Image: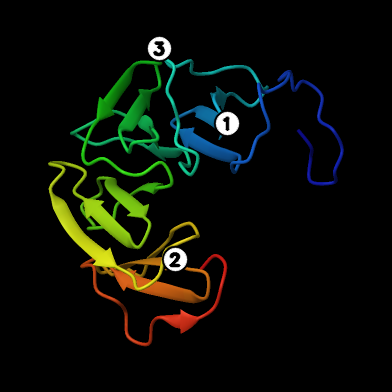
């Protein structure tokens, strides 16, 4: 743990992960608690600001290789929780007390990209899977399919979300040589796809 000048901060006690870390390291905050969250190839780490374990899931969760870790502050439907997907697309919820719940929606391939964001503007995170050449979104309350969008190329990069207000929420992603922007109704935005590669 470093400060803004690159100096190592005292008091950071975390030791080692079990394998290399390939995911983003994220900081989530809920009420008066901070969560530093990341994963290696087999384990999920949820720490406090001193590097101590803050949440230990009650069961070992197999995490898909492209699953990031998401956090929702909760709603009337579910308490504050973290969310990840396993290799077949089952979504696991980890609560702040370590309890684990899961949701099976539709089987995905092991290469799927899972996202957990509010795409329909109802303040509840929705389930978004991008797998091979399509993105499919399911309602976070009742798991009903909101839309499916099929690209004309295999998607190789992560998903980016853009909220322009007034329920204008868009998804950006990319294939080997094209970038796409679709709206929250599952329609391709005007002017897309564009020639490009890498993250949107």
Q: Element type at marker 2?
A: strand
- Within-10-Å neighbours for mark 1: few <14, some 14–19, many 20+: some
Name which quarter of the figure residue 143 lies in.
Answer: top left
Residue 137, by quadrant, is bottom left
Q: Measure how far apart labels 1 and 2 are at the Cα level.
A: 24 Å
SS for dot 1: loop
For label 3, the SS is loop
Q: Are marks 3 and 2 in contact (CB under 8 Å)?
A: no
Contact between labelled residues 3 and 1, with CB atoms less than 8 Å apart: no
Task: From the top left corner, tell me how far across and down residue 5 is, in percent.
Answer: 85, 46
Outermost residue, bottom side: 191
Q: Is residue 9 left or right of residue 155?
A: right
When the figure is inspected, residue 50 is found, relative to residue 112, above or below; the finding is: above
Q: Of the residues tagged 1 and 2, which is closer to the observer?
A: 1
Ranked by sequence position, the earlier of labels 1 and 2 is 1
- The first of marks 3 and 2 along the sequence is 3
- Nearer the viewer's eye, disc 1 or disc 3? 1
Residue 125 picture location, percent across and down: 29, 45
Which residue is depicted at the point 56% across and 25% down?
A: 45
Q: CA distance from mark 3 to mark 2?
A: 34 Å
Question: Number of labelled discs?
Answer: 3
Q: Would you name the residue on which mark 3 appears?
A: 58
Please tell me how crowded label 3 is: few (under 14), some (14-19), or many (20+) other residues with Cα within 10 Å. Answer: few
What kind of colouring is applied to the model shown? rainbow
Q: Which residue is the extreme one toward the top?
A: 58
Q: Residue at x 43, y 62 (%)?
A: 155
Q: Which residue is mark 1?
A: 41
Q: Label 2 belongs to which residue?
A: 173
The residue under the point 31% across, 43% down is 108
Please report the residue visible at 38 percent of the width from the left and 48 percent of the height from the top. 115
């Amino acid at each position: 743990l470093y400060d803004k000048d690159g100096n190592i901060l005292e008091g950071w006690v975390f030791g080692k992960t079990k394998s290399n870390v390939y995911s983003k390291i994220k900081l989530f905050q809920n009420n008066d608690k901070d969560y530093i969250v990341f994963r290696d190839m087999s384990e999920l780490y949820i720490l406090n600001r001193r590097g101590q374990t803050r949440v230990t899931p009650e069961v070992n969760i197999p995490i898909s290789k492209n699953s990031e870790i998401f956090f929702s502050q909760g709603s009337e439907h579910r308490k504050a929780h973290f969310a990840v997907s396993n290799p077949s697309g089952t979504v696991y919820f980890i609560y702040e007390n370590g309890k684990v719940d899961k949701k099976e929606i539709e089987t995905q391939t092991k290469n799927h990209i899972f996202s957990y964001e509010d795409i329909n503007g109802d303040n509840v995170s929705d389930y978004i899977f991008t797998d091979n050449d399509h993105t499919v979104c399911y309602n976070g309350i009742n798991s009903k399919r909101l839309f499916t969008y099929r690209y004309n190329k295999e998607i190789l990069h992560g998903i980016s979300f853009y909220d322009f207000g007034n329920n204008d929420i868009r998804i950006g992603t990319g294939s080997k040589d094209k970038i796409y922007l679709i709206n929250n109704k599952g329609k391709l935005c005007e002017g897309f796809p564009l020639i490009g590669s890498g993250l949107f």
